[in-house]
Image: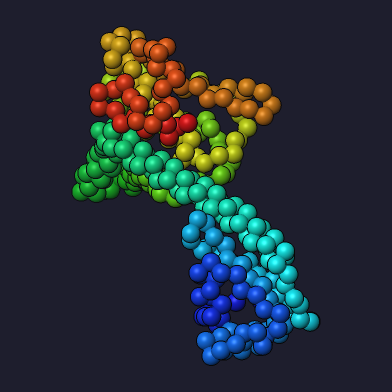
């Protein structure tokens, strides 16, 4: 028999299961009446001699059914076996319910993480505009220079070639900024792959570089050589680093200190572990806040949302 029978082929059985009733028959003749005619024809066509089917229920909701069938011979389904089947069905339904709750919770976490990235990118609009403006300005300048060269006679083809090469390189720089933005703003399930942490953190540093200049912050990279790749979601790892960087720069703004240094550091902690550190020279964290900083919606910033560190965790 097939592992599942479409419900529209057994409407009488389906109606009883949806009402929370166990369906069982030892032979097809027990399915009497015109309302069970289609069910009889379906079971006969599939060679089913006898069958017991228990609804899978989560609370008062039927989410499926658990069925046992015989094909070679008829069988009487004792009350004891039906009771065991119902108990097993309850266990299976509860397991399905937990799995569904886990999937829903994971979906909510992914949605919240995406919302956090969008909000963070919104904070960096000035920095991103600056990073894009540099190569675009260089492209315009080179294009104008190329026009002037072409208006001279004879045309210096070597100089034209150099100008075109510069335009291509600046176009690649602008395209790389857009690629990084698209990857951060993209919504989807985590992609667990090999990640070069030094490269990923370098991208984050470039992303916030112009914003750091405006804030008077110096970014220093202390990246260990020869680090192995780690397995993780590149975008999520960058989101964590980006969040810590922005928190650090905010803390240094509040401290009023002139020596504003933010350090990215990667360390080979042991054979199987790579550690990433983000250190700032800001105000630090009050001891009384240490137990709260990862709680959702807790923030010490006047305009903070309180989800950054919760997402990072």
Position of 44 with respect to 121 (left or right) is right
Within the image, what quadrant is residue 248 found in? top left
Within the image, what quadrant is residue 215 found in? top left
Q: Residue at x 52, y 56 (%)?
A: 58
Instruction: Name the foreground residue: 94 vs 141.
Output: 94
Does the image show residue 34? Answer: yes
- How many circles with numbers are drawn on the protein? 0
Within the image, what quadrant is residue 21 found in? bottom right
In this view, the residue farthest toward the front is: 79
Instruction: Name the foreground residue: 157 vs 127.
Output: 127
Q: Residue at x 40, y 13 (%)?
A: 288
Residue 51: percent from the left, percent from the top?
68, 76
Q: Residue at x 41, y 28 (%)?
A: 295
In this view, the residue farthest toward the right is: 72
Where's the N terminus, which quadrant?
bottom right
Instruction: Name the foreground residue: 87 vs 38.
Output: 87
Residue 37: percent from the left, percent from the top?
57, 89
**Residue 232, placed above or below residue 104:** above
Instruction: Name the foreground residue: 43 vs 130.
Output: 43
**Residue 248, placed above or below residue 182:** above
Does the image show residue 121? Answer: no
* Colour logic: rainbow
Residue 26: percent from the left, percent from the top?
71, 79
Position of 281 with respect to 102 (left or right) is left
Residue 143: percent from the left, percent from the top?
25, 45
């Amino acid at each position: 028999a097939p592992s599942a029978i479409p419900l529209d082929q057994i409407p009488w059985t389906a109606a009883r299961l949806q009402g929370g009733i166990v369906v069982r028959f030892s032979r097809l003749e027990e399915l009497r009446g015109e309302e069970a005619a289609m069910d009889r024809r379906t079971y006969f066509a599939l060679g089913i001699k006898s069958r017991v089917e228990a609804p899978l229920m989560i609370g008062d909701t039927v989410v499926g059914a658990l069925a046992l069938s015989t094909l070679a011979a008829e069988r009487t389904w004792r009350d004891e076996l039906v009771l065991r089947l119902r108990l097993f069905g309850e266990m299976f339904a509860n397991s399905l319910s937990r799995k569904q709750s886990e999937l829903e919770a994971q979906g909510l976490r992914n949605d919240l993480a995406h919302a956090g990235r969008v909000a963070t990118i919104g904070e960096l609009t000035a920095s991103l505009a600056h990073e894009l403006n540099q190569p675009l300005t260089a492209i315009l300048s080179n294009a104008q220079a190329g026009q002037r060269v072409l208006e001279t006679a004879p045309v210096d083809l070597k100089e034209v070639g150099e100008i075109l090469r510069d335009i291509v390189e600046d176009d690649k720089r602008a395209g790389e900024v857009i690629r990084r933005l698209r990857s951060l703003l993209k919504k989807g399930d985590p992609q667990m792959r090999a990640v070069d942490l030094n490269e990923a953190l370098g991208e984050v540093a470039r992303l916030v570089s112009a914003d750091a200049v405006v804030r008077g912050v110096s970014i220093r990279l202390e990246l260990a050589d020869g680090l192995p790749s780690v397995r993780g979601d590149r975008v999520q790892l960058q989101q964590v680093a980006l969040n810590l960087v922005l928190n650090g720069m905010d803390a240094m703004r509040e401290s009023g200190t002139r020596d504003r240094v933010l350090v990215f550091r990667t360390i080979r902690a042991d054979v199987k572990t790579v550690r990433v550190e983000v250190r700032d020279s800001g105000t630090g964290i009050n001891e009384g806040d240490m137990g709260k900083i990862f709680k959702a919606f807790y923030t010490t910033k006047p305009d903070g949302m309180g989800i950054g560190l919760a997402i990072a965790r």
